[in-house]
Amino acid sequence: MKKTIKQFNLKNKRVIIRCDFNVPIVNGKITDNTRIKSSLETIKYAIRNNAKVILLSHLGKIKNEDDKIKNDMYIVYQELVKLMKKKIKFVNNTRGDDVDEAVRNLKNGQILLLQNTRYEDLEDNKESSCDEELSKYWASLGDIFINDAFATIHRKHASNYGISKYLDSGIGFLIEKELKEMMPAIELPDRPFVLILGGSKVSDKIKVISNLIKKADHILIGGGMCNTFLLSEGYNMGESLIDKDSIEYCKNLLNEYSDKIILPIDFVVSDEFVDKKGTIKDISEIKDSDIAMDIGPKTIDIFGKYINGAQQIIWNGPMGVFEFNNYNNGTKKIAELISNNYGTTIVGGGDSVSAVKSMKLENKFSHVSTGGGASLKLLEGGNIPGLENISDIDDYNILKKKHF
Ligand code: AMP
């Protein structure tokens, strides 16, 4: 486990907290403030412990001056004031004299929010390319750095990785929760452990498969991904999405792990990539003009048997083109089946999480991860930029044993 905010003496210290305030904004209004709310626990803890709090976050992408207007952090500032019911200072800048002065004037228990860190991207992509001088400058504003922006831990940016190189650093409560839920399941899974993968491309998930193939008892593969596996076995997949560069990889993996990898045996197919009623076909019936859009009912039954027999399930990626109402059945049924499992059930990845949320099943999962790319990165194993410079204080396996 990583060092957390609780391991620091915050009193009188300037504490930089990297939050994830990247909320959706439509017509100048925040349409979902969940991310701001999720940051409050760490911010409140810091002010309760008499820190001088400096908040940093990105908001959207900044490529031109118009993007700056659309993604001005002031809107987050207003929402934060409402949620915190407290005066907060805002500086309409990411560096410079006014930032320095606001930091100098901060008193214990006060909060300062700076402008969108990605405003720095307008000049040479300074935030997103982890510019050294910018990283050092931001680090110079604080004594302690707390990273609580889970959704960006997979990125090597100045406001997370960059600052953590120069300050004593830890994680906030949001990242702590994600790691506590995800890491023991990855490092020391309950068995049988069933991994379910979907989504579009095999190549995006090769590292996840490589990291978990030995640990998982079974990997159920649906979505666009399974097409390439089936093609590598010699099936005609018609006009279905194929990841040509991964055919050889799939073939080799199936040779080595034929007992672990479970592939669909039927599909809902269409002759066009549009949202119209499809036809259910067995894999052997697929014609040259067919597109596999969703897994079929026999596959759902088979996947269901593995899901019911599992003690731990990790799911990432939709089973079909779930954005189309005619092809969301597989994803919905899999979500429902997992939600009825009494073991450890974890879902990560933007699309599968939205499916779970749209069905109001969040509370029936052990953990619904808040970061798509970030949770995929945890599943891949290896170095995680946003956590790399934060010291380890406990082993995840020990953590799990302590749990029970
Ligand atoms: P990912 O970001 O890799 O999890 O992929 C999510 C995307 O995969 C979604 O936009 C789905 O529409 C897409 N997808 C899932 N199944 C299929 C399929 N059978 N054919 C094409 N795209 C698919």
Image (spheres, rainbow, N blue to C red):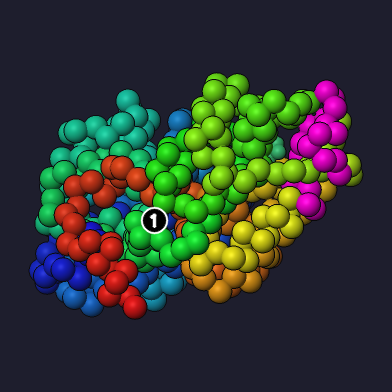
Q: In which quadrant will I find the C terminus? A: bottom left
Give above or below for 329 relative to 205: below
Q: In which quadrant will I find the N terminus? A: bottom left
x and y percentages locating residue 165 in the rendered image: 16, 43
Q: In which quarter of the view is residue 106 placed?
A: bottom left
Residue 229 in view of the camera: yes
Classify the position of ligand 1 by quadrant: top left, top right, bottom left or bottom right.
top right
Q: Which residue is mark 1?
A: 186
In this rendering, would 168 be left or right of 114? left
Q: Which residues are magenta?
A: 280-298
Residue drawn at the location 63% of the way across and 71% of the way down: 340
x and y percentages locating residue 378 in the rendered image: 38, 49
User: Nearest the camera: 143 or 267?
Assistant: 267
Q: Report crowding for label 1: few under 14, some 14 to 19, many 20 or more residues within 10 A (C-alpha).
A: many
In this rendering, would 224 be left or right of 77? right
Is 296 part of what is drawn in magenta? Answer: yes
Mark 1, ligand 1, within 8 Å: the answer is no
